[in-house]
């Protein structure tokens, strides 16, 4: 075998090794992401307030996500279902039509906790919610 052929084989082996590492790493990342359990979570408005905004934050973070309601509002007696939520503990910030907000912490969202009822008592316990 010539030195040139040996060098080509060595480069080919290194390339295959790097390609294997990339493919294996992608599979690991993909399976880790697919292992995250996601579910639906229904917010049931049993209060006398109309909600204009609903924000979520994982309880271990300090940043609110986007407004989950978008252009919708949730009137008394109505509900709103969040879809594709990764299981975990969440803080929820509800904002009514007047801009009053209430933050409720550590709401479990997962297979065994599929809905949350918002009541006047719950909202009135929030400082400043009138």
Image (spheres, helix red, strand yellow):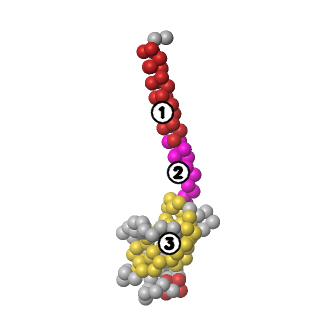
Measuring 48% from the left and 33% from the top, which residue is drawn there?
18
Q: Helix, strand, or loop for circle 2? A: helix
C-alpha separation, residue under disc 1 versus residue under disc 2 = 21 Å
Measuring 36% from the left and 83% from the top, which residue is drawn there?
98
Name the front one of labels 1 and 2: 1
- The front one of 23 and 53 is 23
Name the front one of labels 1 and 3: 1
The disc placed on residue 33 is 2
In the rendered image, the vertical position of residue 13 relative to residue 124, given as above or below: above
The disc placed on residue 42 is none
- The front one of 94 and 44 is 94
Label 1: which residue? Answer: 19
C-alpha separation, residue under disc 1 versus residue under disc 3 = 42 Å
Q: Answer whether residue 73 is visible to the viewer in this image.
A: no
The answer to which image quadrant residue 110 occupies is bottom right
- The front one of 115 and 108 is 108
Label 3: which residue? Answer: 91
Q: Answer whether residue 97 is visible to the viewer in this image.
A: yes
In the rendered image, the vertical position of residue 38 relative to residue 93, given as above or below: above
Measuring 45% from the left and 80% from the top, which residue is drawn there?
102
Q: Answer yes or no: do the residues labelled 1 and 3 have beta carbons within 8 Å?
A: no
Classed neighbour count for the residue bearing mark 3: other residues with Cα under 10 Å, few (<14), some (14–19), many (≥20): many
Q: Answer yes or no: do the residues labelled 1 and 2 have beta carbons within 8 Å?
A: no
Asked whether residue 30 is drawn in magenta, I would say yes
Q: Which residues are magenta?
A: 26-39
Number of callouts: 3
Figure quadrant of the C terminus: bottom left
């Amino acid at each position: 075998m010539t030195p040139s052929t040996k060098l080509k084989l060595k480069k080919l082996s290194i390339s295959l090794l790097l390609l294997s590492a990339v493919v294996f790493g992608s599979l690991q990342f993909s399976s880790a992401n697919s292992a995250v359990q996601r579910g639906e979570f229904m917010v049931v408005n049993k209060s006398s307030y109309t909600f204009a905004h609903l924000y979520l934050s994982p309880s271990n973070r300090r940043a609110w996500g986007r407004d989950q309601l978008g252009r919708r509002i949730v009137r008394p007696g109505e509900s709103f279902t969040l879809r594709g939520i990764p299981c975990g503990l969440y803080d929820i910030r509800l904002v009514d039509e007047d801009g009053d907000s209430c933050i409720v912490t550590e709401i479990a969202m997962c297979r065994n906790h599929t809905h949350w009822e918002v009541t006047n008592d719950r909202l009135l316990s929030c400082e400043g919610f009138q």
